[in-house]
């Protein structure tokens, strides 16, 4: 089961009732925070989310509305008595920017493990989740992310027996892909059925529409994607600033066919994005406008 909360749905500038774009995903005690603009820690507290339990912070890019909340958040995590290391992932150059931001947040009581993305596609395994980072098209280096919880097939005693897997190795294969027992190698496919559908969520913002976004969103339970502009008159503005419109995000969703599309990262010039939702639902019906605090619990489907 994966819990998802939109922490902020604004782009560029916060509004009085809309914080800057951020999202938290929780799985099996691990907390993954995507982006951290100004005010993120305030919104997290409003949602009653413990700051000290954030394990991994994934930054799409280093514009201020996506990173300026880091010093305050990290300081508050320290004040909440966190001592375990925190992993931060971001584009090349992120470490330098983080170091500059932390001039005002020295002597944190925990280690920061910084990973810089340098390739078009990189994968990580963190706290039982598979993280894929993929480069998108913004005015500076920017990445989208998918978080996936993979799920092995059901254990089959009949298949294990048929393949000569001894009972004493059954439990071992539930923990590892391959085990050695009594001098022989046994693999998980000798005792398990085909992998079952897991859980997959995409988070992508600040980009022009690209095929890689729809490719990465295929099979997703939820696609969280920017819809910076809604009006037809703002298409040229979206192209100039390398952002997306509601229509463009919906077209990507139609190509990927996730279970649901959440639009986020709304322009300050768009105080009520719900007024324009029909331009997206006409293309991809299961589209909703994200709001700060929007919550979803995704369960495994058998």
Image (spheres, grey):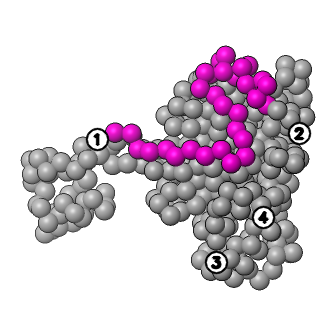
Q: Which residue is mark 1?
A: 194
Residue 123, given in percent of the width and then of the height, sits at: 55, 52
Calculate the distance from the C-alpha at mark 3 to the C-alpha at mark 1: 40 Å
Q: Nearer the viewer, mark 3 or mark 1?
A: 3
Earlier in the chain: of badge 2 and badge 1, it is 1
Q: Which residue is mark 2?
A: 268
On screen, residue 100 above or below 137: below
Residue contact at pointers 4 and 3, CB within 8 angstroms: no
Calculate the distance from the C-alpha at mark 2 to the C-alpha at mark 1: 47 Å
Which sits in the foreground, 204 or 1? 1
For mark 1, does the 10 Å Cα neighbourhood hold few (<14), some (14 to 19), or many (20 or more) residues? Answer: few
Residue contact at pointers 1 and 4, CB within 8 angstroms: no
**Residue 257 visible in image:** yes
Which sits in the foreground, 91 or 202? 202
Residue drawn at (71%, 51%) of the image: 7
Helix or strand or loop: what does disc 4 sit on?
Answer: helix
Magenta span of residues: 273-302
Helix or strand or loop: what does disc 2 sit on?
Answer: loop
Residue drawn at (14%, 66%) of the image: 168
Residue drawn at (68%, 48%) of the image: 293
Earlier in the chain: of badge 3 and badge 2, it is 3
Q: Which residue is mark 3?
A: 82
């Amino acid at each position: 089961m994966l819990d998802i909360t939109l922490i902020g749905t604004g782009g560029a500038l916060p509004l009085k009732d809309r914080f800057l774009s951020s999202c938290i995903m929780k799985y099996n005690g691990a907390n993954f925070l995507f982006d951290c603009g100004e005010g993120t820690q305030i919104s997290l507290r409003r949602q009653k989310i413990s700051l000290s339990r954030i394990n991994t912070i994934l930054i799409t890019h280093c514009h201020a509305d996506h990173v300026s909340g880091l010093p305050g958040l990290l300081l508050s995590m320290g004040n909440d008595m966190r001592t375990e290391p925190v992993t931060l992932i971001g584009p090349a150059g992120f470490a330098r920017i983080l170091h500059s931001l932390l001039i005002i947040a020295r002597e944190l009581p925990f280690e920061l493990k910084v990973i810089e993305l340098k390739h078009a596609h990189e994968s990580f395994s963190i706290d039982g989740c598979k993280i894929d980072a993929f480069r998108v098209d913004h005015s500076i280096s920017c990445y989208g992310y998918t978080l996936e919880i993979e799920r092995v097939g059901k254990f089959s005693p009949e298949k294990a027996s048929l393949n000569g897997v001894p009972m004493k190795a059954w439990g071992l294969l539930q923990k590892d892909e391959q085990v050695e027992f009594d001098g022989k190698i046994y693999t998980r496919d000798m005792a398990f059925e085909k992998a079952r559908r897991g859980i997959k969520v995409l988070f992508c913002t600040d980009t022009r529409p690209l095929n890689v976004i729809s490719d990465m969103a295929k099979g997703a339970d939820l696609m969280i994607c920017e819809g910076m502009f809604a009006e037809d008159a703002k298409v040229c503005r979206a192209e100039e600033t390398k952002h997306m419109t509601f229509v463009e995000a919906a077209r990507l969703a139609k190509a990927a066919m996730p279970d649901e599309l959440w639009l986020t990262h709304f322009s300050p010039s768009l105080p009520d994005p719900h007024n324009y939702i029909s331009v997206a639902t006409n293309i991809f019906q299961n589209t909703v406008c994200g709001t700060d605090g929007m919550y979803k619990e995704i369960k495994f489907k058998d």
